[in-house]
Image (cartoon, rainbow, N blue to C red):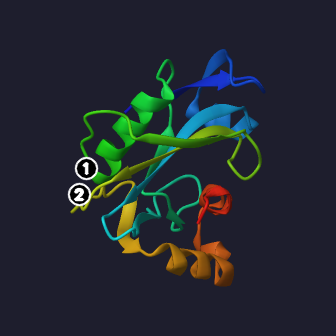
Amino acid sequence: MSEEIFDVVNERDEVIGRAPRSEVHARGLLHRAVHVLVYNGRGEVFLQKRSMKKDRQPGVWDSSASGHLDSGEDYDACAVREVGEEIGLRLAHPPERLFKLDACEETDAEFVWIYRCESEGPFTLHPEEIDEGGWFTTAEVTCWMAERPQDFASALLFIWKRLAI
């Protein structure tokens, strides 16, 4: 399989070039990603535990689905694609946009749009991307993060602080 190509962006999230995934990460180039939080009718959030095969932050808990924008892809299309690829959730339209984070150390040099949607599952987890997943109350996640922040992806910790929970 050929390596993913990402748009490289400037500090205003404007495309200034393209580069392979490995180069973008090795050089710390600014690029784009999405995080989608899926909630059920009881208000619980579905979190995934990243596969140990991942090249970045393996084995930690993360958003319901997340990923990089392919070159030329927009944020909304990426959000729909990622929930389909990672957890098998098919969306007819983009999920609700919550907020955007500027690229920084916590986001691994990514500009990130955060999305929210609702589903009861069950989900089909992509085995190369995800080791396991589960539903958690927001209080459980907040407490868990306070006690064991090392269990979570840095971007999710950053996102969680911004959520009005």
Q: Tell me the quadrant of the picture where the N terminus can be found.
A: top left
Asked if the residue under mark 2 is in contact with the one under mark 1, i.e. CB atoms within 8 Å, the reply is yes
At horizontal 59% and vertical 75% (from top left) the residue drawn is 142
Residue 112 appears at what percent x and percent y?
Answer: 61, 40
Q: Which residue is mark 1?
A: 88
Q: Tell me the quadrant of the picture where the C terminus can be found.
A: bottom right
Amino acid at circle 2: Thr
Q: Nearer the viewer, residue 92 or 73?
A: 92
Residue at the top extreme of this rendering? 16
> Visible in this render: residue 4?
no
> Residue 15 got which mark?
none
At horizontal 72% and vertical 53% (from top left) the residue drawn is 106
Q: Nearer the viewer, residue 38 or 65?
A: 38
Q: Residue 15's quadrant in the figure?
A: top right
Q: Residue 77's quadrant in the figure?
A: top left
Q: CA distance from mark 1 to mark 2?
A: 5 Å
Image vertical order of residue 103 relative to residue 11, above or below: below
Image vertical order of residue 23 relative to residue 17, above or below: below
Q: Nearer the viewer, residue 165 or 32?
A: 165
Q: Nearer the viewer, residue 75 or 105?
A: 75
Q: Which residue is mark 2?
A: 124
Image vertical order of residue 74 relative to residue 32, above or below: above
Question: In the displayed structure, does residue 142 sit left or right of residue 86?
Answer: right
Residue 93 appears at what percent x and percent y?
Answer: 31, 33
Secondary structure state at the residue bearing disc 2: loop
Q: Residues within 10 Å of mark 1 (few under 14, many from 20)?
A: some
